[in-house]
Amino acid sequence: MDFRTDILPHRDRLYRLALGITMHTGEAEDVVQETMIRAWERRTEWPMIKNMGGWLALICRNLALDSKKRQARTAFAHVEMPSDEGRRIEARDTLDYILRIAATLPPPQDDIFRLRDIEGLSYQEIALQLDISEDQVRVYLHRARKRLREQIVNKI
């Protein structure tokens, strides 16, 4: 196993995962960097890992959740917005709103929604990553989407 060929190709997906959880670009970059460091420190375990992407995503997810908890403890809320275009700002606001609502979903609905609808993973990839059946993925995703629709409709 090689860091450049087996670990680094997962960097973009890990960034999107971290960004979806932390909602802050700088924090997401830090989480991915820490994920890479942790993976390197545990390189002796690599040959035993069957799903490298899932393993890295689990590390990244846990680090991002820890980071989000630290952010919640501070009084500073950093929200980055695109600089000029009104439509980009509105789209970003809408995405932020949906992600905030998604963050209130119970586990594992929150993870499954993020992995499927934000990350674009297949049902099979999600099932492997979370160690559940594809049918369970479909059920949890249906429940998550239904709950999101209800919350959005109630806010309008």
Image: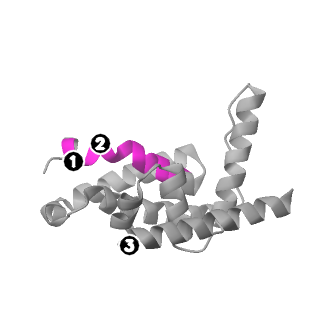
In the rendered view, would you say 149 is above or below 17?
below
Using the rendered image of the protein, determine whether residue 75 is visible from the camera's viewpoint: yes
Quadrant of the image occupied by residue 58: bottom left
Q: Position of residue 55 (x, y in %)?
A: 31, 62
> In the current view of this chain or complex, which residue is farthest to the front?
135
Q: Where is residue 4 in the image (x, y as percent from the top left)?
A: 21, 41
Q: What amino acid type should be assigned to the residue bearing mark 1? A: Asp
Q: Name the residue under label 3.
A: 133
Tag 2–tag 1 contact (CB < 8 Å): yes
Quadrant of the image occupied by residue 136: bottom left
Q: Is residue 18 magenta?
A: yes
Q: Nearer the viewer, residue 1 or 127?
A: 127
* Residue interval drawn in magenta: 5-19
Q: Name the residue under label 1.
A: 6
The span from disc 3 to disc 2 (Cα, nearest Å) is 26 Å
First in sequence, mark 3 or 2: give its number: 2
Using the rendered image of the protein, determine whether residue 69 is visible from the camera's viewpoint: no
At a point 66% along the width and 68% down the height, the residue shown is 104
At a point 68% along the width and 54% down the height, the residue shown is 98
First in sequence, mark 1 or 3: give its number: 1
